[in-house]
Image (spheres, rainbow, N blue to C red):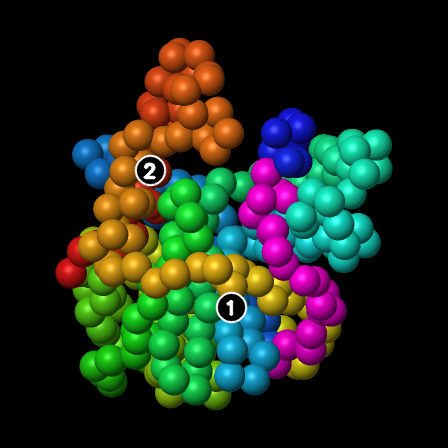
Amino acid sequence: MTRWISLAITCVFGNVCYAQLTKTVDYALIYDLSYIRDTSANEYHSGYECIAMRVGDEGRFQDFNEYFNDSILISFGERYPGLNTASLPKEQLDAVLEEIDATMAKWQKPSTDKYRIVKDFSSNRSKLVSIYSMTPQHLEQPLAQDWQLTTIQDTIAGMRCYQATTCYGGRNYVAWYNPDIPISDGPYVFAGLPGLIVKISDDKNWYSFTLKRLNLKPHERFWNEYLILPASTPVSREIFVRTMKERKENPKMMGLIGKEPEEVRLQRKKGFNKRFDLLLEQNH
């Protein structure tokens, strides 16, 4: 991790007062997300793991590697309270940034910027972080739980599941839930079925979430109180979708805008051509 990325941490988590780093979660669910990369060739991303967990009325959903990396970065903010405002003396700040660089070089898991979601089960609403806006923003909306239940059954991941369908964000989805696990939750913004969602895909099979493993007992886990920053402001679906689409079509690196070689920018743009995960949400 380069020094400019280390310095960016002080901006991202600026004005944040760190509290306890762990909480007792009610459960934790690991899903595998796969998505289309080339619609003409039916080429798919190999998939990456996401974590869903809940404490009381609050749920979280996040790319697992980002979740792991956050736990490291935020632990530095707790150890060095002046880091989040860059108010440490210069020599100490340089030493801390070098320590962060060395730690992340050893432990950082590979990831790209993915969705961060907070679910409020008391109000049945969700917040999706707009990870590509220059200022903290999020899309706030009802949880996706307007389901049509069916009597169709199948065995998914070794579990007896029932089928249900819903429309969300401009796409039609088919879900498979297990009524023997009385948890009305699932991946992404989905919830509200009479059992745990084991698998859900859109009707084109461009996006698919599949349960890989789960821990249904209360246990301690890292809990980022500031998954959505206090300064974040809500935006419309139109703005949220447009921001994600612009990121896919013209990706930029914070801190390097106008400074990187043109061939590097074009190479990144070529790579983002297959980032269909950025188009999961539509303006409907």
Answer yes or no: is residue 33 visible: no
Residue at coordinates 51% horizontally, 68% vertically from top-left?
Answer: 60
Q: Position of residue 140 (x, y in %)?
A: 34, 68
**Alpha carbon separation for disc pair 1 and 2:** 24 Å
Residue at coordinates 43% horizontally, 87% vertically from top-left?
Answer: 122
Answer yes or no: is residue 89 visible: yes
Label disc, if present, on residue 247 of the rendered structure: 2
Q: Over which residues does the magenta segment extend? A: 8-26
Q: Position of residue 207 (x, y in %)?
A: 31, 53
Q: Is residue 32 left or right of residue 233?
A: right
Secondary structure category for the residue under label 1:
strand
Q: Quadrant of residue 79?
A: bottom right
Q: Work out which quarter of the rendered image holds the N terminus and state it.
A: top right
Q: Is residue 130 left or right of residue 56?
A: left
The residue under label 1 is 60
Question: Type of residue at label 1?
Answer: Arg
Secondary structure category for the residue under label 2:
helix
Decide which of 107, 2 is in the foreground and name it.
Answer: 2
Tag in front: 1 or 2: 2
